[in-house]
Image (cartoon, grey):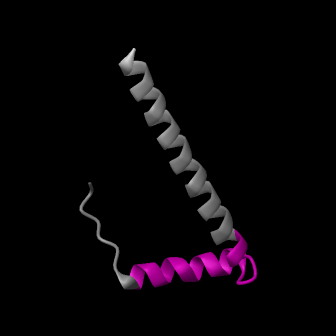
Amino acid sequence: MFGVSVGPTELLIVLGIVMLLFGSSQLPKLARSMGAASKEFKKGVAEGATEDEADSAK
C-alpha cells in the first residue's frame, strides 16, 4: 500500500520494544491472547460470510 517493507532488523527492534514494555514474563500471555483474538475474528468473519450466502440465496 505505502511501499514499506519490514525487514528482520525492524522486526527485532519492535520485539525489543515489546519486551521492554511488557516484560518477558508477560509475553506468553500476550501471545496467547492475541491468538485467541485472531481465532475469534476469523470465526466471526466466517459466520458473517455464511450469513451473507444465506441472505443471497433467499
Residue lying at the far right in this picture: please name it: 25
Residue at 44%, 79% in the rendered image: 11
* Direction from residue 8 to residue 26 in the image, left or right: right
Q: Is 3 colored magenta in this rendering?
A: no
Q: Is 10 colored magenta in this rendering?
A: yes
- What kind of secondary structure does the magenta stretch mostly adopt? helix
Residue 46 position, x and y percent, is 48, 42
Question: With respect to residue 46, does 8 lie above or below?
Answer: below
Which of the 4 image quarters holds residue 26? bottom right
Tell me the quarter of the image containing the N terminus.
Answer: bottom left
Question: With respect to residue 40, does 44 lie above or below?
Answer: above
Which of the 4 image quarters holds residue 54? top left
Residue 41 position, x and y percent, is 55, 48
Residue at 60%, 63% in the rendered image: 35
Residue at 69%, 77% in the rendered image: 28
Residue 42 position, x and y percent, is 51, 50
What is the total number of numbered labels drawn onto the structure image? Answer: 0
Q: Which residues are magenta?
A: 9-29
Which residue is more in the foreground, 26 or 10?
26
Residue lying at the far top in this picture: please name it: 58
